[in-house]
Amino acid sequence: MILEAVELNIKPGQAENFEIAFKEAEAIISSINGYISHQLQKCIETKNQYLLLVEWETLEAHTVNFRQSDIYQEWKSRLHHFYDPFPTVKHYRIV
């Protein structure tokens, strides 16, 4: 299992719209081969900051199955315009 961890900083005044768009986009990511689960958590201390955690069966499930799919363009068009700055994605494995 691979854990994708992404800190998302949302443009001021867009948090509510982001949450609505994310709810709509959840079906996209969950349809990908190799997807296990995800969580979106809102930061208590930092306004407009979220943590996205996605569990994948393999690294390639995220980097190939999702990121190189046609459906990724839909995910991107729904969510990427909310981010400032654009987030860095990191992957982790259990040790």
Image (tube, rainbow, N blue to C red):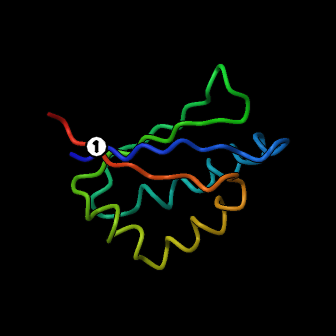
Please rate how many residues cluster around mark 1, counting C-alpha atoms within 10 Å: few if below 14, some from 14 to 19, many from 20.
Answer: few
In percent of width and height, residue 25 lies at 58, 56
Q: Residue furthest bottom?
A: 70
Which residue is nearer to you in this view: 29 or 63?
A: 63
For image coordinates 36% across by 44% down, the residue present is: 37
Q: Is residue 69 left or right of residue 21?
A: left
Q: Is residue 75 left or right of residue 48?
A: left
Q: Quadrant of the N terminus?
A: top left
For image coordinates 56% across by 52% down, the residue present is: 87
For image coordinates 47% across by 79% down, the residue present is: 70
* 51 over 78 or under it: above or below: above
Kind of residue at disc 1:
Tyr
* 74 over 10 or under it: above or below: below
Q: Is residue 11 left or right of residue 46?
A: right
Q: Residue furthest right?
A: 13
* 76 over 39 or under it: above or below: below
In percent of width and height, residue 27 lies at 51, 56
Instruction: Locate residue 92: give its quadrant.
Output: top left
Q: Quadrant of the C terminus?
A: top left
In percent of width and height, residue 76 lies at 59, 67
Residue beneath disc 1: 92
Q: Is residue 35 left or right of residue 44?
A: left
Q: Residue furthest left?
A: 95
Circle 1 SS class? strand
* 16 over 30 or under it: above or below: above
Which residue is nearer to you in this view: 56 or 24?
A: 56
- How many numbered marks are there? 1
For image coordinates 75% across by 40% down, the residue present is: 15
